[in-house]
Every structure is written in structure tokens, then in C-alpha cells.
Image: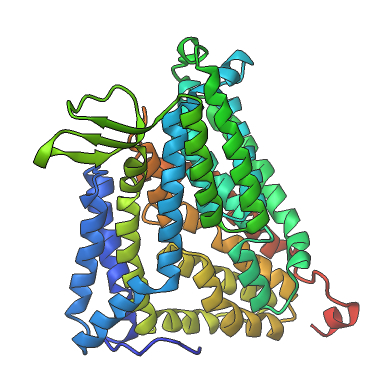
Amino acid sequence: MKNDVKKLEFYGGEWISFLPFVVFLVLIILTTFYYGSISDGALWVPAFSALIVAFFFAKDKKIYAETIIEGMASKAAIIPIVCWIFAGVFSRILRTSGLADGIAGVAASMGIQGTFFIVISFIAAAVFATASGTGFGTIAAGMGVLYPAGIALGAHPALLAGAIVSGGAFGDNLAPVSDTTICSATSQGVDVPGVVKSRLKYALTAGFLVIIGIIMIGMGYTGTISSADVVQYNPATLLMLIPVALTIWIAVKTGDIIIATTFGSVLAGATAVMAGLIDFVQIDPSGNVVKEALIRVAGEGLDRTVDGVIYTGLSSMIQVVMLALLLFGSIQIMRAGQGDVKLLNALGNIAKTAKGAEFVISIMIIALSGLMGLNAPAILAVGASFAKPLSEKFGISPYRTANLLDAQSNTLVYSMPWTPAIIYTISFARDSAVPLTAIQVTPYVLYAYIMLAVMLVSIILGIGRHDNMKKEDIKTA
């Protein structure tokens, strides 16, 4: 496999390049799962410690240090970080404006609550993600608006969060403008529209089963419904749906979450100020918070502080940004140490039949995307160099291979506790009425597990193996 990074050698060979992930996961299990910690340190310290431990196994310490910097400074690292920062401000403005209360109030007045609201949230998230192609943008919008509204309507907190993440995964899997769709199609040399069309049978089946799963799980949950209070909402908060709709339209038209959330933040801030929901600037020497403001200056002299809604939105993303930087350093170490090549070569020797090849391709992409917490880079690593030759050898349609890469890369990458998607999700829930831990959300990202099952069945039955192939090619295959 062609590698575009400098080779980093370890005492113990290429497998040692996985050590940062191993140490990180072990410490995460101890701090997050065993001790139940959800603090910043429960995530940052394991990620940082993992880089320190692996440092002593590197033969060339300077190359190791440069590799960490390359990973943290890479475009793959910076793009999601910038998106998170801009989405964080946009989401905070929506939350502070009271839009969630308005949505909850309208839903309550219509008799929509609990599990029914979760189903609607999943569908809304799936539609938004499919239209915009952004899983993280969907999580930001859903957790910022739908999550607090659902909690007020008695929805199962973890199931609601999982449904929002599931909707993001659905759209990431299906959207024509999604980076995973584009990467999976181009890596196999096929057209995006054809891939999306052939992928519908998997995505829609999984989406339908997710709705059934939500209903079945939600039936056994009885939450506290505060609809009596929520119905008494400020009607002006519903004006915030205008910037939300415009932001979604911009995201769909541009396919760029930064452009969309930049316009969205300006439009949402202006709407909230004009509607009297938030002040624009607030200067208060006393330091008493009377009303939220986009920019707030409090105190006097050396004790003066500058904060407000914009500041809160930025600071709320610190945890996920810091963790992402550390994890991207670990990802680059794995690539520079060629641990990913070692893993893929080992798996590639297992395939003996077409069915076996599909299983191997699936294991490759699930393992890499799950470890990285990223799906597009995993598709690029597996797609052209390994999946394409394997599928050609066993007569598997390139459309089928593209679908295997994309569908399987949108499973565990959205549900494992250490992945950016889950960390991002719980960061929005931390200061809500019901904060969540990663381990609480993980079991309820139903789309991840159902899609795994759907693709497993399709492999066993050979569904889609010869999509868009000519009859004569199928015979020779």
C-alpha cells in the first residue's frame, strides 16, 4: 500500500504503532466505564498518556514528535475541529434563545411526547443529514434543539441522543454530498448517483428497523413530562425556526457546514436580538446576569470578564477539540508506523471466496474506522489499495464494494465511546437537564448495530454482489 507519511519504526515492529489506541482504550475503560467519570480529564489524560507511553517504543524520537505534529496539523484534523467550533456557536445561540422550549411547547400542545418525539427526531435528523451530508452538523443541530425539547416531553434521554446520532449516521451513509459517499464511489471508480441508488435498499431497511427499535425500547420507559410548564413558552422563540430553515437550505446548497453555520450564527443572533430573546451587548459592572447576551462584559478593572453566548458556544467545544487533536496524533502514529498496512495485509490473506472477500473488506473498514473514530480516511486507506483488488479478484460489483465500504464505515465509528461522534454528542448534553456519559449513549445508537446486521445478512445471502454488472461478467466471476 502506498503510504504518504514518513516511516516510523518501533521496537517490536509495526504492530506497536497501535499502542496509543490500546493504552487510550484501557485508560478510558478504567476512568469512564469503571469509575464512571465524565470529566474532561477522563478523556484528555488517557489520550495524552497514550502518546507518552508509545514515545518510549519509537526508535527515532524526533520522527515520533514530528509525526504527532503532522497528525494534529493535518487537514483531516483541522476540518472537523473548525466545523465543531462554528457549529458550537450556532447551536448555543439556538439553545439560549429558547427554541427548544418553543418546539417542546408546540409538540406538547399537539400531543406529541416521549417515544413518538424520538421517532420524529430520528426522521428529522436523517432527512437533514441526507440533505446536507454532515453527520456532525446533524448532531449539533439535534442535540442543541431536539434533545432538550425531548427531555421536557418525557423522552428516554439516551435513546433520544442515540436516535439523533443514528439520523446523522443514516445521512452520512446515504447523502450524495457526503465525504464517505464520494470517497467510497471514487475509490472503486463508479458514479456517485449509481452508488446512492444501489445503497437505498440497505439504508432504508436499516432506517425502518431503527424506528421499530425506538418504539420497542421506548415503550418500556416512563419519563417525567413537564408539558404543563413547556406549553407556556414564549411564541417569539418560534421565530428562530427561520434561521434554522435558512441554515439547512444553505447547508444543502453548499454542502459546507462552515459556510452554513457562519450564515446561521449571524442570522440566528440577529433574529434572537430583534425578537428580544437575547441582548446584543451587555455591559454590567455589577456582574449580575439579568438577561443573556451575545457579548457580555461584567465587572470592573482587573476583575472585568468578557463572556456571553458566543463565548459559551466556543468554550463548550474545548473538550471535543482537545480530544480530537490528541487522537489525530495517535492516528498519524499508526499510519507512519504502518500498523494499518500490517492489519490490512493480514486480513487480505484470509479471503478465499467472494463471500469471504466481502467479510474481509467489512472487517478491514470496521476495524480501521472504529479505531480512528473517522470513516472517510478509513475508506481511503482500504478502498483503492485493498478492497478494489479483492472485489475484482472474486467478481464482486464495484458498486457493492463501495456500499460495503460506506455502510460498514458508518457503524461503530458513530457508536463507540471513544469516537468523536459520541464525545461530541455528550458535550452538548453536559449542561442540559439530563447530562449523559459516553457509555450511556453507546448502546442506543441503533443505526450502527442494525446496519451491521443488515450488511451481515446481505453478505451471507449475496444481496447486491452483482449490482449493475453485465450478465457475461457475472458468469465469468
Q: Compare residues 292 and 220 and report the one nearer the observer.
A: 292
Indicate left or right for 133 with 328 as reference: right
Task: List x then y, in percent, for residue 328.
Answer: 36, 69
- Location of residue 380 (image quadrant): bottom right
Quadrant, the C terminus:
bottom right
Image-based side of 296 in relation to 396, left or right: left
User: Is residue 34 visible from the viewing direction of this image?
Assistant: yes
Expressed as whole percent of the image width and height from the top left, the position of residue 12 reads 25, 85
Q: Is residue 160 visible?
A: no
The foreground one among 69 and 2 is 69
Say which residue appears at 54% left-offset and 55% top-offset.
259
Q: Is residue 31 above or below residue 373?
A: above
* Marker count (numbered): 0
The outermost residue toward the left is 302
Q: At 38% across and 43% down in the image, what residue appears?
A: 426
The residue at the far top in this view is 228
Q: Locate residue 338: give its quadrant.
A: bottom left
Residue 381's x, y, as percent? Answer: 52, 78
Residue farthest right in this picture: 471
Vertical relation: 470 (above or below) 451: below
Q: Is residue 185 above or below residue 395?
A: above
- Rendered residue at 32%/71% (across/down): 329
